[in-house]
Image (tube, rainbow, N blue to C red):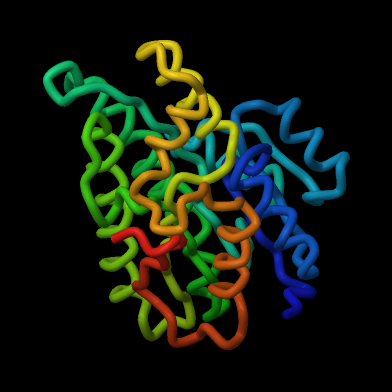
Amino acid sequence: MTLQGQRALVTGGGRGLGRAIAAALTQAGATVSILGRDELTLKEAVAAGLAADCAACDVRDEASVSAALDKLSRQHAFDIAVANAGAVETGPFMRSDSERFRRMLDINLIGTVNLFHAALPAMLEHRRGRLIAIASTAGHRGYPYVSAYTAAKHAVVGLVKSLALETARSGVTVNAVCPGYADTDMATASIDNVAAKTGKSREEALAAMIKDNPQGRLIAPEEVAAAVLYLCGAGSDAVTGQSLMINGGEF
């Protein structure tokens, strides 16, 4: 596959899944811009050759996203926009107040909405584009102690399905990629947190994390990136409104 001549944008592109996605798009020939809150991390990824340029922004803030795109492209003209930035907070429902739900919706859902709002007009004008949201298996099923995160990821999947219908004849496709627990710094932090709170070993915390994955492992970031590449390819023109689960068969 080649994405030569295409411009791509990835939020949360400095680390984890976003970094792997940016690297894969770059390797496929796209000119990749990455967004995130940590400018030093972004610049390190650019220096490593994983992206062409970067801009710092807060995806929860529509004006901040628009200003970042102004810096990268005055016309906000991107062929591919990947809404990857996200976060998770854990805790039982009765200890998850409305502010936690707002935080999870702001970063996971509104961050996606803001990127899509900024990138879609130019795609519609050019009659071609790829909008991709990195959601989660939690967008399809429930998990205990992450009700706010799960609700937000369900909302992202619903957004993708609805927007895909609005854009079905425009040349723009809208899809989600839904990984299970992936081998990223977010998973490492979760394992450390569980171990610290419960007294379990890191090995026990990891075993609990992957127990629902029939393959018994974490998902590699490169596997998620490969799914993004597929959705960007010429052979995926009829694939829209879909939610591609990369989770080792967990349902």
Report the number of discs: 0
- Front one among 102 and 242: 242
Does residue 98 appear left or right of residue 249 in this picture?
A: left
Residue with the most extreme left position? 94
**As displayed, is residue 198 above or below residue 120?**
above
Counting from the top left corner in percent of width and height, residue 122 is at 55, 66
Question: Which residue is depicted at the point 73% across and 74% down?
Answer: 3
Does residue 210 appear left or right of residue 68 in this picture?
A: left
Q: Quadrant of the N terminus?
A: bottom right
**As displayed, is residue 131 above or below residue 172?**
above
Counting from the top left corner in percent of width and height, residue 127 is at 52, 80
Does residue 11 appear left or right of residue 150 in this picture?
A: right
Question: Which residue is depicted at the point 32% across and 27% down?
Answer: 103
Question: Which residue is depicted at the point 37% across and 44% down?
Answer: 211
**As displayed, is residue 95 above or below residue 87?**
above
Counting from the top left corner in percent of width and height, residue 131 is at 49, 64
